[in-house]
Amino acid sequence: MTATSLEQDLASLAESCDACRLCKLGSSRSQVVVSRGNPQARLMVIGEGPGAQEDEQGQPFVGRSGQLLDRMLESVGIDSNHDAYVCNIVKCRPPENRKPTALEMASCKPWLDRQIALVDPAVILLAGATAVEGLLGIKGGMTKIRGQWRQWEGRWLMPVFHPSYLLRNPSKERGAPKWLTWQDLQDVQRRLAQLDASL
Ligand code: SF4
């Protein structure tokens, strides 16, 4: 796919999301939040859903959690706006920042599927349990599954703690969630470098 046609397809997807009222989140949002970053990147980051700042600015991961994620990615040499395409399981903000319901996630999944098909990432970083549940249908705590590579539809998936959890657990000590996430992100960076070397 050429860069122009990819941009056109993503612009058309964003317009469709903007008009979407498939679930009730569509009626409480300020604006739809589809993506930021580079659609030609080999890394996709998927989070849960927009928070207050994302809903206000129309971009995913721009609040405190997003800023932490950006800093952590940067520490392993990944610029979230140039080296990644960033999006969420649901495109509209759940009121009070609650977790999206199973129905809301299912309603929004076709948009995510389309994003994945168009961007065609080699590696997907799943930020938090809701991202894992929304994409893979796997429920459960992140402690057991974070840091473990999975293969899914020809892509590499890495589940990591959500940055909002890391904001609540700021210790950088060895073995703490933040330290573990940093190990996971280094692993992601190594995987991307290997994939680049094999091109
Ligand atoms: S969350 Fe997704 S499915 Fe629901 S209204 Fe927004 S774009 Fe549509």
Image (spheres, helix red, strand yellow):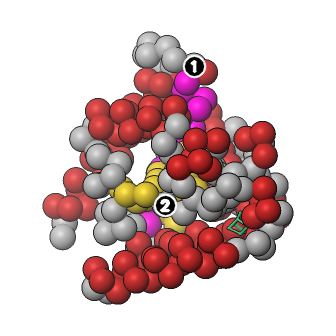
> The disc labelled 2 sits on which kind of residue?
Ser
Q: Nearer the viewer, residue 32 or 90?
A: 32
SS for callout 2? loop
User: Where is residue 70 drawn, in percent x and y?
Assistant: 39, 39
The percent position of residue 19, horizontal first and vertical second, equals: 67, 76
Left or right of 82? Residue 31 is right
Is 56 drawn above or below residue 68 in the view shown? Answer: below
Q: How many marks?
A: 2
Closer to the camera in the image, 54 or 103:
54
Q: Up-down: is 71 above or below 138?
A: above
- The residue that label 1 is drawn on is 169
Horizontal arrangement in the rendering, residue 131 relative to residue 184 (left or right) = right
* Neighbourhood count class around disc 1 (C-alpha, 10 Å): few under 14, some 14–19, many 20 upward: few
Q: Residue 42, percent across and down?
A: 33, 63
Confirm whether the magenta stretch covers residue 180.
no
Residue 103 picture quarter: bottom right
The 10 Å Cα crowd at callout 2, few under 14, some 14 to 19, many 20 or more, is: many
Image point 62% across, 71% down: which residue?
Answer: 18
Mark 1 or mark 2, earlier in chain: 2
Q: Nearer the viewer, residue 90 or 126?
A: 90
Which amino acid is tagged 1?
Asn
Q: Quadrant of the N terminus?
A: bottom left
Which quadrant, please, contains the C terminus? bottom left
| Residue 145 at least partly seen | no
Q: Which residue is mark 2?
A: 35
User: Which residue is located at x 16 percent, y 61 percent?
Assistant: 197
9 over 58 or under it: above or below: below
Task: Tell me: residue 59, above or below residue 24.
Answer: above
| Label pair 1/2, CB-CB below 8 angstroms | no
Q: Which residues are magenta?
A: 155-167
- Occupied quadrant, residue 145: top right
Q: State ligand 1's quadrant.
A: bottom right
